[in-house]
Structure formats: C-alpha cells, structure tokens
C-alpha cells in the first residue's frame, strides 16, 4: 500500500491555518459569553465567611486540576518523545484525544475562574459559586480532564505493554 506524500510546507500551512481558525473561534466564543446578559444573584458589598471559604475552595480546586492537567501534558510529551518511529497513526489517536481533552479542561477552568472574577467586580458585585454558568464551566472542567486521563491511560498502557514486550491490555501487538 502506497502512502500519499504531502509537501512539508502544505502540512504546516494546514496546521497553522487550523490554529488560526481555532483561536478566532475561542475569541468569538469568549466575546459572546462576556457580552450576553448575565445574572449571578443579589448584589453584595462583601463576601460572608462562608462565601470566602467557597471562593478559597473553588480556587484551590481549580489550581489542583490545572496542575494535574499540566502533569498529564508532561507525561504525554515524555511518552511521545519515547515513541518508536514505526508506530502506526491509529496508536496515536488516544494521545491526541487526551491532549485535546486536557486543553479543553484548561479552557473551561479558565472560563470558570473568569466568571468568578467577572461576578465579583463592580457593578455586579455578586457571588454564587453554584450559579448555572459557573456550575457548567466547573463540570466541563472536571469531565474533560477525566476524559483526558482515560485516553492518556489507554495510550500509556499500550505504550508500556509494547515496551515490555507484552501485548497491550485486551489486544495484540499491532505494530
């Protein structure tokens, strides 16, 4: 079976065109989200002790999930640099899926943080960490990170199985 050859410049052009489209889409979505009517609750002059604890817990959770995602990116990069040259493209799909999910998790974590900061600034001066907009971003942050971890585990188990000479879990050596 012959492989189609693509000129190196065309592949890079496609990649960077895709990146530009992705950045434009994120900026457009961000603009849309910030310019729609947002209701977070009654106006407050200062946070209650309970709300301060909620804010601290939210920020700590957000930092932890970002740290876990960063570690997963690092481990994924380590495994990809150890990758053998004769790897099939289908074996890389879990790695690509994991990277995309972790990237989305970073984005949703940023959105949740941005919503909290937006809600606390005047003229809104409200706080509801369980509001529908914050809750959706928080849940998307966790779910996409978990999906990224599952895809990473699939890729890592397959790679470690090949490295030790054993068949990957539930399959045969197909490299």
Image (spheres, grey):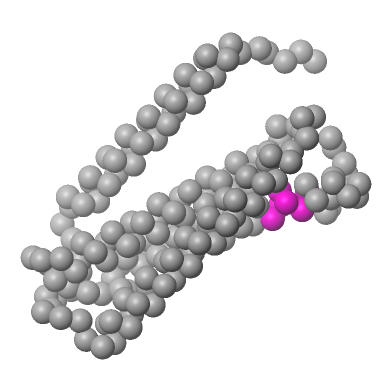
User: In the shown orientation, is residue 120 left or right of residue 154?
Assistant: left
Whole-percent x, y for residue 172 in the image:
88, 44
Please check the rendered image and state whether residue 154 is part of the magenta-colored stretch, yes or no.
Answer: yes
Which quadrant does the N terminus fall into?
top right
Residue furthest right in the image = 165
Q: Residue 110 location in percent, x, y?
A: 36, 56
Task: Please give the name of the residue rendered at 11% of the width and 75% of the height, measured from the top-left corner.
Answer: 43
Most distant residue in the left direction: 123
Whether residue 170 sits left or right of residue 96 in the image: it is right
**What quarter of the picture does the C terminus occupy?**
top right
Q: Main secondary structure of the magenta part?
A: helix
Q: Is residue 5 above or below residue 144?
A: above
Seen from this angle, which residue lies furthest bottom?
Answer: 49
| Residue ID at (71%, 35%) | 90
Does 72 sit above or below residue 165? below
Start-end of magenta stretch: 153-158
Q: Which of 62/94 is in front? A: 62
Among the 4 quarters of the image, the one containing residue 47: bottom left
Question: Residue 50, percent across and down?
Answer: 29, 87
Out of 169 and 125, give the one closest to the viewer. Answer: 125
Which residue is pictured at 42% across the width and 24% down the height?
17
Vertical position of residue 64 compared to residue 103: above or below: below
Q: Position of residue 103 (x, y in %)?
A: 48, 48
Question: Residue shown at 37%/30% (left/top)?
Answer: 21
The reply to whether residue 147 is visible in this rendering is no
Q: How many marks?
A: 0
Q: Is residue 128 magenta?
A: no
Q: Quadrant of residue 109?
A: bottom left
In the rendered structure, the answer to whether residue 109 lies left or right of residue 27 reads right
Is residue 3 visible in the rendered image? The answer is yes
């Amino acid at each position: 079976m012959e492989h189609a050859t693509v000129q190196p410049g065309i592949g890079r052009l496609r990649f960077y065109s895709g990146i530009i489209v992705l950045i434009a889409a994120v900026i457009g979505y961000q603009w849309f989200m910030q310019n729609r009517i947002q209701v977070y609750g009654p106006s407050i002059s200062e946070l209650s002790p309970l709300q301060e604890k909620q804010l601290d817990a939210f920020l700590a959770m957000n930092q932890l999930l970002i740290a876990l995602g960063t570690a997963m990116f690092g481990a994924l990069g380590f495994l990809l640099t150890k990758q053998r040259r004769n790897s099939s493209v289908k074996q890389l799909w879990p790695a690509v899926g994991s990277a995309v999910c972790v990237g989305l998790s970073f984005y949703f974590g940023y959105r949740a943080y941005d919503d909290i900061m937006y809600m606390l600034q005047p003229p809104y001066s409200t706080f509801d960490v369980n509001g529908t907009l914050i809750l959706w971003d928080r849940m998307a942050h966790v779910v996409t990170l978990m999906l990224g971890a599952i895809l990473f585990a699939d890729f890592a188990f397959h790679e470690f199985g090949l490295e030790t000479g054993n068949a990957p879990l539930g399959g045969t050596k197909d490299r």
